[in-house]
Amino acid sequence: MKLLIFDSSSLITLSMNGLLPLLADLKKQFNGKFIITNSVKFETIDRPSNIKKFELGALEIKNLLDNKVVEMPSSIGINENEVKEKTGDILHKSNNSFLARNEFMHIIDLGEASCLALSLIAEEKGMESVIVIDERTTRMLGEKPENLRKLFESKLHTKVQLKGDFSFLKETKFIRSSELVYVAYKKGLIKLKDGNVLDALLYATKFKGASISRQEIEEMKRIS
């Protein structure tokens, strides 16, 4: 079983760019499941459904859930209590590991932590998973926590100490909505044909939430 686990950030980026319908087409070509956690459901459907500014996006994401384009962890036999317990552990560890000015920094929230938790649980059960997340901090926490410490030092202009060990996340895989849109483009799922479509798609994700540099975008365009 292969999984794409969607964080709120990636769903919101796709929603703000009118690209959510791509998920249904991608799902048809993906040998696995698209999953969201209960925390991500709350952040992208339940809470914004009551906010006029975000109501339409929430309804569009709910439609994906209703039509089983995206599904809950129960669809792959993972219990919500199991996810909650591991989410709590990850939240506590992450938010008590970077020390600046004698205080621990709050670096991730419930949604991101729940995606990490679900990915770890899925891997333990023999399922391959990739987290689709546009938020840079969580990705760096899994990929290069020392670089994240240096980034915090640069931004805060003060010494930051890394007290935690995040080697348990070293096998966790991440992609951004930008890479997902790139795949859709390469598979011919984008209806637009005239103009510099790939450029427009990638920069749209950058300006609406994805943490991706111009250099990375230009490299993706070069190899397309």
Image (cartoon, rainbow, N blue to C red):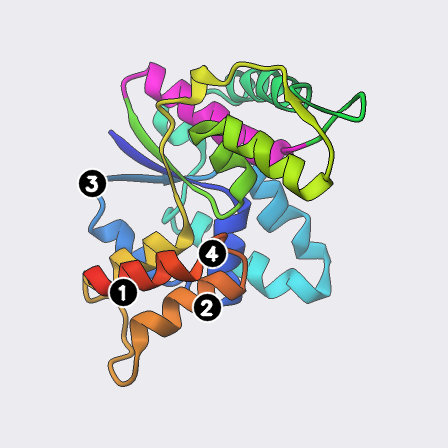
- Residue at image mark 2: 204
Name the residue at 65% across, 62% down: 54
Crowd rating for badge 3 (residues with CA inside 10 Å; few <14, some 14–19, many 20+)? few
Are dots 3 and 4 in contact, CB under 8 Å? no
Observer-side mark, 4 or 1, equals 1
- Residue at image mark 1: 221
Q: Nearer the viewer, residue 201 or 215?
A: 215
In reply to whether residue 190 is colored magenta, the answer given is no
Name the residue at 44% across, 16% down: 167
Residue furthest to the bottom: 194
Q: How far apart in space, not on screen, are marks 3 and 4 (Cα)?
A: 21 Å
Q: How far apart in space, not on screen, are marks 2 and 3 (Cα)?
A: 27 Å
Residue furthest to the right: 102
Name the residue at 45% across, 26% down: 118
**Disc 2, SS:** helix
Q: Amino acid at mark 3?
A: Asn
Of the two numbered discs 1 and 3 on the same chain, state the one appearing first in sequence.
Answer: 3
Q: Quadrant of the C terminus?
A: bottom left
Observer-side mark, 2 or 4, equals 2
Q: Which mark is residue 63?
A: 4
Observer-side mark, 3 or 4, equals 3
- Residue at image mark 3: 31
